[in-house]
Amino acid sequence: MTTQSARSSWLNTRRGQQLLENLTAYLFLSPAILIIFIFGIFPVAFAFFVSLHEWGRFPDEYVGLAQYVKALGPFAYVLFFWIGIACLTGAGWALTHLWRDSAGERRGLLYLIPGASLTAALLAFVNWFFILLLFLMNVPVRLRGQQVTQVSFLNEFYASFQFPQALAAAEIMWIVIALAGVISLLFIVLIKTERRGHQLLQSMLCFTLLGAGVLILQLTLTEIQTAILAAQASGESLPIWSQIIVISAGVGLLGLAYTLWRRGIHADSDRQFVMQALIAVLLVVGGYLLIAELPRALGQIDRDIISGFNVTVMLTIGTVPLQLAIGLGLAVLLFQNIKGQAFFRVVYFLPYITPFVATATIFSLLFSSRPESPVNQLINSLGIADQNWLREPSGIFQLIFGSNVPDALAGPSLALLVVILYSTWVYAGYSTVIFLAGLGNIPKEMYEAAKIDGANGWQTFRFITLPLLSPTTFFLVLIATIGSFQAFSQIFLLRKPGAYEAVDTINLYILEEIRRDRPDYAYGSAMAFVLFAVILILTIVQNRYAQRRVFYG
Amino acid sequence: MAEITAQSIEQVESIATTQQPPKPFRIGDLLTYAVLLFGAFLALLPFIWMLSWSVMTANEVSRGQLIPNQILLQNYTDAWNRANFGLFMWNSVRISVISIVGMLLFCVPAAYAFAKMKFFGKNILFAVMLATLMIPDVVTLIPNFLTVVWFDRLGQSIFGDVGRWINNWPSLTVPFMASAFTIFLLRQFFAQLPDDLWEAARIDGAGHFRYLISVVIPLSKAPIMTVITLAFIASWNSLLWPLLVANSDDWRPIAFGLSKFVTADASDEFHLQMAASVIMVLPIIVLYFFTQKQFTEGIASSGLKG
């Protein structure tokens, strides 16, 4: 009875309530967080780890950036060099942020010390974990040739922790963690500032980026060194450094021209001329550097990746504008007081929710190469000869203007055109529904004001609807672009023998690395990361663009 | 005249906009309807074709006819039996039920915690969770496969065949039991619930758990239905991941069954392919028609806030 009341009275204090709330919250969160961590966050680090090895069914030796060099040629070094620099820049940015934040309270900067030690602890843990992971993944290899029983796997599982390297890493980890714990506790008890959690996290972010940048740069620089030495040994020269310098200078000059152009818009007319001349010079020089060097650097990219990206880009260009235009048109029409709006919405959305497998089956029959297929019958009645559609790898312009059109201008293949039509059919309704919701968010007063000002229908659309709809449009462009870079199931289902290469996006090449008899997980992971980098860059560019153009009312 | 204030004009106008009098008929309206109907026709055309081919004879299909001479319902039973759809359908039902139950158990409390509770590291956790939405599936595909294979061996050595992951329900369902998107969608709804409700419940002596069960969930039927529908569609649709982690028919889903039937078993019998497609699509369409209002609204609102 007394313990009961003591407990409840302690729980009723503010501290007790806080603790209880924290515990309950983490109880609620832990299963979801655990699953998201194991299958959503950890895999990114794991995939990078895999891509640094030879990795068939089981891990083999560490090969550094070799998989990326196989995928991108020497351009991989340029890429990683810049990723390292970007991490260091990020660290510097986080540091200046911290400095500015704690200007009024210099003591906040002292939190760099526990931040550094906690980051060191984190890195030590990651180091130990990935060393251990290699041994864990190799358990089946070590059991090869033995009679495998239930117990033997578990024994080898425990044995993985006992390898000298794992033990050494564990020892370092425990020491660093203990030190970090003591230092952090000391600081938390001794130095009390406001927002210390914030300061601690920011300094940890800073040091994590610093650590990542240093590690990546070190890896890249040693790789470049060995590559150059190896090339010299065989009597060739490998112009990696000059490539890095030239390409970086080219990109840098173009960037500078862009910033000057942005500034120059607000400059007065005297300076404007000087500005424009400067911009022109920068553009020409930067562009020349890039044109001179990029093809040589990009020339050694794996053919599969080039073809995969080609297809992806054509698919994106073919699908996204078409899908958005149809969606916008239908949404604007539907948004008027239309009878049966709900009916149309349901119907337009139907292709999007129907399983890919079924709709792709219908499309492969509609666009089959048989002369009796509905689409062939249709074009026959228009006086056009039968086409092979999904089995046709040649470009549409070659089909229209004859085979003397050069390959570079051949355009998307006929097979890809069918995939584009299919994707548009699937996603146009989705865009319609999202645009419809966006239209609903535009305040009615805007239209009334426009009506009073005497705007006609087109003017209202151009100057009211389009600008106010821009957040929705931006969202859809982003989603559709990323979606088409990730396009997978529809292509897997629509690809037909004879035209695989014409429709295979990079995802399909990755799947092939996994599904063949001797899978190459390392190369697959490296390709996946290249794709990830491209998607990330696209997202950032679109975001920058949107910051200027999108009107968030 | 002086009585006509700005307010009353506004009232009149709002009435006018909500209850529009029957407009005079215009040519423009006719055009609008024509375009909209044409769009609907294009959206439906492949479905119409699927339906009519699914009841034809093989001959009629190969002639490319659109209207069947007679309606052959036998195609459906043929397709069902030949494609072994009984098994695949049962597998898909099992997979989706397990993953939906798991998803509700794990995501609803997590979304509630993010929406209504104060705890250490909330913003960071939420940001990290949202960041996972940026990661393309193809990056996580290989490592997740390696992880699942390894879990399979570990589970087998501890629990025997019951603990297997490959060719068993865990590999097909556990990775989908918590998704950042689901948690985000539910959180957006939970966050809109007024805090007064929680104050009242707390005065009545309810804790977070009781409040979640007896107040929040009953008030959130619409978003929960949306999430269930989305999860069901996703699991009915999923093909690639099952292709990797299920290599016997014991746990292969319906999407695999249809794609195998179409490419291998009945690659020349188009009428049976279409009948099988109709069977596969039917549960999704039925579910969609029952939940379409909440569903499209859920998608639209979640999309816009993302």
Image (cartoon, coloured by chain):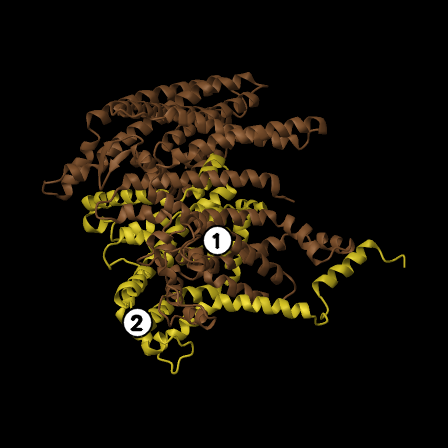
Closer to viewer: mark 2 or mark 1: 1
The circle drawn on residue B155 is: none
Q: Quadrant of residue B236?
A: bottom left
How far across and how far down the image is residue B238, in percent?
36, 55
**Residue corresponding to mark 1:** A318
Chain whose colour in the figure is yellow = B
Q: What type is the residue that disc 2 sits on?
A: Glu
Q: Residue at x 34, y 47 (%)?
A: B175
**Hey, what amino acid is under mark 1?**
Gly
- Distance between mark 2 and mark 1 Cα atoms: 32 Å
**Count of picture labels:** 2
Residue B156, percent across and down? 20, 46
Compared to B35, does A486 lie above or below?
above
Relative horizontal placement of residue A105, taking residue A158 as reference (left or right): right
Name the mark on residue B269. 2
Q: Colour of chain A?
A: brown
- Tell me which corner region of the image, top left, top right, bottom left or bottom right, holds residue A434: bottom right
Q: Is B77 situated above or below A434?
A: below
> Residue at left 59%, top 66%?
B35
User: Mark 1 — on which chain does it sit?
Assistant: A
Residue B181 percent across, percent down from the top left: 45, 47
Report whether A545 appears left or right of B232. right
Is residue A331 visible to us here? yes
Across and down, in percent, residue A481 comes to 48, 48
